[in-house]
Each structure stands twice: as C-alpha cells, then as structure tokens.
Image: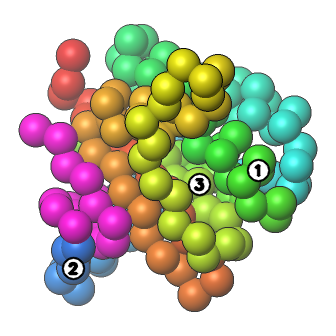
Amino acid sequence: MKRQARGGGPTAVGAFSAQTMEEKADSALEQAQSPQLRRRLERADLGAVPETRRALRELLRHWGRPGRSEIAELLTSELVTNALVHTDHDAVVTATVGPRALRVEVRDFVARIPRVRVPNADDGTHGRGLALVQSLADAWGVRAHGVGKAVWFELDAGAA
C-alpha cells in the first residue's frame, strides 16, 4: 500500500498525520543507529546530482536490494535536481537505511510546496520528477520546516 503525506514522518498516512512522542523518539534512535548519508548541496550545482547518486550507491551496497537501489538512485536524483533547479538555494540530502525501509529526504530553504504535474508531450523531459516519485516510492511526502521544506520518500526493505 502506498502512503502519501504532506506532513508528519515515516508513519504518516493521508494528507496530514502527527507522530506520537514515542514514535518520534523511536525514529530518532533508529536513525542514529542506521547507516546514513548526509550532504549539503550548493545552489545550482547540478554536478551534485551524479555525486549524490554515487554516494547513495555506496551507502546502499550492503542493503541487498539491487532493484530497489536503482529506484532509490533515480528518485534521489529527481528530488535533488528539483531542489537545485527550482529554488536557487542550497539543499541538504539525507538518506537513512533502516531495518524496515530506506528514507531519503531533500531539504531546501524555500517554502513553496511542489506539486505533482501531469506532463504532456510539449513538456519534453521536464515535469516528471514528482510523478516518478509518486509512482515508484512506497511512501512520499512534503514536510514544512521553519525555513523551507523537505521532500521525502521511502522504499520498504521487504518490497520486491
């Protein structure tokens, strides 16, 4: 079952969801003990996209889900590209491998919420990023921050 959220965390289902304090503490502990990638990306540095893919590939080498790793690389590339192209600001990418899922989050510093577009033939290769995330991720969403937002997705470890 796919989950989409605009707020909340890994357990969010539907438009908005709140985590209990216990769930937040468990999530923070799980992230602290899990392999993680965290990179700050300079604004408009599209060279960061392939570098982030390589770093993610290295992180996921021992995950044991080759097909899921390729999907993770693709979706991460889309989110990083969106953040760098559409915000004209720096961004921060974080990927965490947990026992139940991979979670990738790209935070930028612009409050404008992205929307899924239905691309048409005139769009060329543009406008498909969030549609790919929506169709390939097991869960995804947008979480507002004090300054900006984070767009995230999850791939379940048990999924084929």
**Which residue in the protein does label 3 denote?**
106
Q: Is 13 part of what is drawn in magenta?
A: yes
Give the answer, above or below, for where 147 lies relative to 33.
Answer: below
Regarding residue 72, the answer to whether it shows in the image is no
Indicate the quadrant where residue 52 lies: top right
Residue in the image at 83% along x and 60% along y: 88
**Which residue in the protein does label 1 denote?**
84
Tell me the amino acid under the disc marked 1: Leu
The tag earlier along the polypeptide, 2 or 3, is 2
Q: Which residues are magenta?
A: 1-15
Can you tell which of label 2 and label 1 is closer to the viewer? Answer: 1
Q: CA distance from mark 2 to mark 1?
A: 29 Å
| The N terminus - image quarter | top left
Please state if 142 lies on the left or on the right of 80 as rendered: left
Say which element carries label 1.
helix
Q: Which mark is residue 18?
A: 2
